[in-house]
Image (cartoon, rainbow, N blue to C red):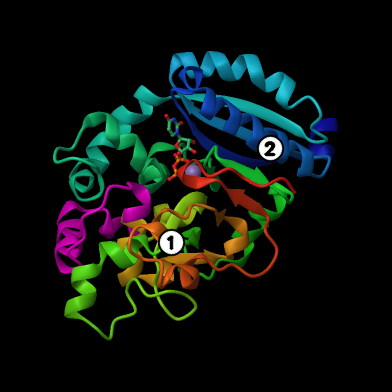
Amino acid sequence: AGAELEGKPKRFHALMMFTKVDKSLSLQQKFQTAMRSMVKHGRFLEDEILVLHYVSDLGSQEFGEKMLPELLLDASFQYEVVFHNVDTLTEKLFPIVEAMQKHFSAGSGAYYSDAIFFLSVAMHRIMPAELKRIVQLDLDLKFRSNIRDLFQEFNHFPSDAVIGIAREMQPVYRHTFWQYRKENPKSRVGDPPPDGLPGFNSGVMLLNLDSMRRSTVYNQLLEPERVARLADKYHFRGHLGDQDFFTMIGMEHTELFYPLTCGWNRQLCTWWRDHGYGDVFQLYYHCDGPVHIHHGNCNTPIPDD
Ligand code: UDP
Ligand code: MN
């Protein structure tokens, strides 16, 4: 009777790619910063559990298992840790994403091992049906707010939205869509905010797996012919995996994406400022409002608060 009275605990699922971490001091430091800041600001209710999913190779899993008890020691909330083997997930993923890899991967071929960079795209087909929502996070993040508040953003999704994601904060897609923009000078594709479509950054993503499973539109966009047709239309050739795919389909179907404010993924990389886009850079990089998560992308140091 006790269990019935208490009710089921509510689980909040967060997933991180966690490979080659045992071999990289830089990734280990990012991991520590992400976890310590998540713990420092994390607050949950008594019957809630934060479930941390790591997609790992064996060496990284071993490293994570050794480090996590200490990193999570001061957590004021309940948590669970789940490791997913990267090879097992890749095997399930490859047949679904193989065809899109050539459009959105570095190099010419579609390497089997690159399939994992598209995990978010087909997460709804890979994870068990009981898993209804999941947040995917990079390791090079530093939290300044409660991660529970990020999960609350799911509740603001309009009915057609399946993924919550922040905009890309460099003019990288202005560059990628160069030819399309030349042929369509009135298009908003690749233009800066607030009126343009600057594309997305995949460092922080809210995946409503239930909605992704149910959305006919989204699942049709995964079909190889549809991807090929859109890549052709936009002359799209990228190398950033899932974020390229979401950016490209987002130009056609803005309704599938719930825009997170820039403060939930405040990217710090400035590479494109010094590579031909200095004149327009600030239009993209600018971010007003509170910063909840700093993202030290392209190995950019994150300032102390
Ligand atoms: N990652 C990983 N092992 C690697 C490289 C990357 O697990 O060897 C994961 C990690 O979670 C990282 C994410 O992939 O945060 C994306 O890479 P990164 O953040 O370096 O890309 P950026 O944000 O700079 O584009
Ligand atoms: Mn990153």
Residue 50, label in figure:
2
Task: Please indicate whether residue 46 sits to the left or right of residue 212 in the image.
Answer: right
Above/below status of 290 relative to 90: below
Task: Please indicate whether residue 42 sits to the left or right of residue 52 in the image.
Answer: right
Image quarter of residue 72: top right
- Residue range corresponding to the magenta coloring: 217-244
Q: Which of marks 1 and 2 is in front?
A: 1
Above/below status of 247 relative to 56: below
Q: Residues within 10 Å of mark 2 (few under 14, many from 20)?
A: many
Determine the residue positioned at 56% across, 16% down: 63
Q: How far apart are marks 1 and 2 (CA)?
A: 32 Å
Image quarter of residue 139: top right
Q: Quadrant of the N terminus?
A: top right
Determine the residue positioned at 32% across, 54% down: 244
Evaluate whether residue 114 shows in this view.
yes
- N-terminal-most mark, 1 or 2: 2
Q: What element carries label 2?
A: strand
Q: Mark 1 points at which residue?
A: 170
Task: Please indicate whether residue 142 sits to the left or right of residue 230 in the image.
Answer: right
Residue 126, label in figure:
none
Determine the residue positioned at 56% across, 66% down: 157
Q: Position of residue 278 (x, y in %)?
A: 41, 66
